[in-house]
Amino acid sequence: MHLPKYTWTVLTTLTVVGALVVAFFPRPVAVETTPATRGAFQQTIDEDGKTRVRQRYTVSAPVAGTLQRIQRKAGDGVTRGMLLATIAPSAPVLLDVRAEHELTERVGAAEATQRRATAEVGDC
């Protein structure tokens, strides 16, 4: 059978267009299914959040340490002298030979200053 030249062009074009349609046709997405049942529903959301500070207060302490969890809630009343936070002392740092020698020298210098002050008070 002999087909005209334009028929081959049309068939080739239709084949290429059909192949492109099949290639770019969206594939179905695999989903997980299960039968519906009655029961408790629990869902968690694990995301990062942002905290906005409206009023900033600086609280300083004379010692280094770790601030324990504050038991008060927003809006709780406070009175003068009420304990609001507890600071646990931080773990002591391990001393190497150099640091131990430096601290020993500081103690010696402090004792010398104390002796000098005592001598000056005694002279008066």
Image (cartoon, rainbow, N blue to C red):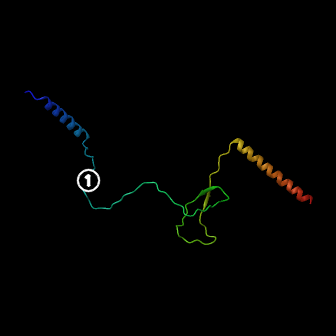
Numbered label tally: 1
At x 61% / y 70%, what residue is drawn?
A: 82
Between residue 79 and residue 55, name the one nearer to us: 55
Horizontal relation, residue 32 to residue 51: left or right: left
User: Seen from this angle, which residue lies furthest left?
Assistant: 1
Mark 1 packing: few (<14 Cα in 10 Å), some, or many (20+)? Answer: few
Quadrant of image for the N terminus: top left
- The quarter holding residue 38 reads bottom left
Percent position of residue 83, x then y: 61, 67
Q: Is residue 83 above or below residue 105?
A: below
At x 79% / y 49%, what residue is drawn?
A: 108
Which residue was labeled with disc 1? 34
Three-letter amino acid code at disc 1? Thr
| Secondary structure of the residue carrying numbered label 1 | loop
Horizontal relation, residue 11 to residue 87: left or right: left
- The quarter holding residue 43 reads bottom left
Q: Is residue 5 above or below residue 45?
A: above
User: Seen from this angle, which residue lies furthest top?
Assistant: 2
At x 59% / y 66%, what residue is drawn?
A: 84
Q: Is residue 47 above or below residue 13?
A: below
Quadrant of image for the C terminus: bottom right
Percent position of residue 2, x then y: 8, 27
Percent position of residue 20, x then y: 24, 37
At x 65% / y 50%, what residue is drawn?
A: 92
Percent position of residue 13, x then y: 19, 34
Q: Is residue 22 above or below residue 70?
A: above
